[in-house]
Amino acid sequence: MSSQWPKWVRDDQSVVSCTEKVKVMTENFDEIKQIAQDALEDGLLMEVSEQQMREALHQLVDSLMNPYKR
């Protein structure tokens, strides 16, 4: 299912080029995409508004916390 994900960069805009790190990010985002797709489809099958489902998914992402913030 591998999608074309962005080139990952650090806060200083240098590219994260470690193959293993990029592989983990790709796997994580492929998995997130599939779970979000499944949730969207389930909501639509339950007759939830597509717009509301998309807004809820956006809100979910916006609510994520950075535990490493200094």
Image (cartoon, rainbow, N blue to C red):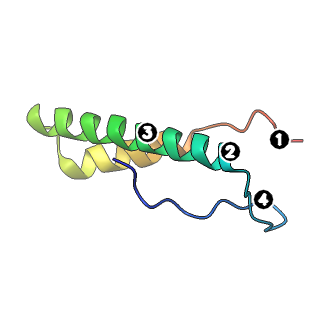
* Separation of marks 4 and 2 at Cα, in angstroms: 12 Å
Q: Amino acid at mark 4?
A: Arg
Q: Is residue 36 above or below residue 5?
A: above
Contact between marks 4 and 3 (CB within 8 A): the answer is no
- Tell me, yes or no, if residue 47 can be seen here: no
The residue closer to the viewer here, 56 or 14, is: 14
Q: Which residue in the protein does label 1 denote? A: 69
Give how far across and how far down residue 25 sits, in percent.
58, 45
Residue 21's disc is 2
Q: Amino acid at mark 1?
A: Lys
Q: Which residue in the protein does label 3 denote? A: 32
Give how far across and how far down residue 56 sits, in percent.
37, 42
* First along the sequence among labels 1 and 2: 2
Mark toward the viewer: 1 or 2 = 2
- Tell me, yes or no, if residue 22 can be seen here: yes
For this view, does 44 lie left or right of residue 37?
left
* First along the sequence among labels 4 and 1: 4
* Separation of marks 1 and 2 at Cα, in angstroms: 20 Å
Q: Residue at x 66, y 59 (%)?
A: 8
Q: Residue at x 67, y 36 (%)?
A: 65
Label 3: element kind? helix
* Separation of marks 4 and 1 at Cα, in angstroms: 14 Å
Label 1: element kind? loop
When asked about the image quadrant of residue 3, the answer is bottom left
Label 4: element kind? loop
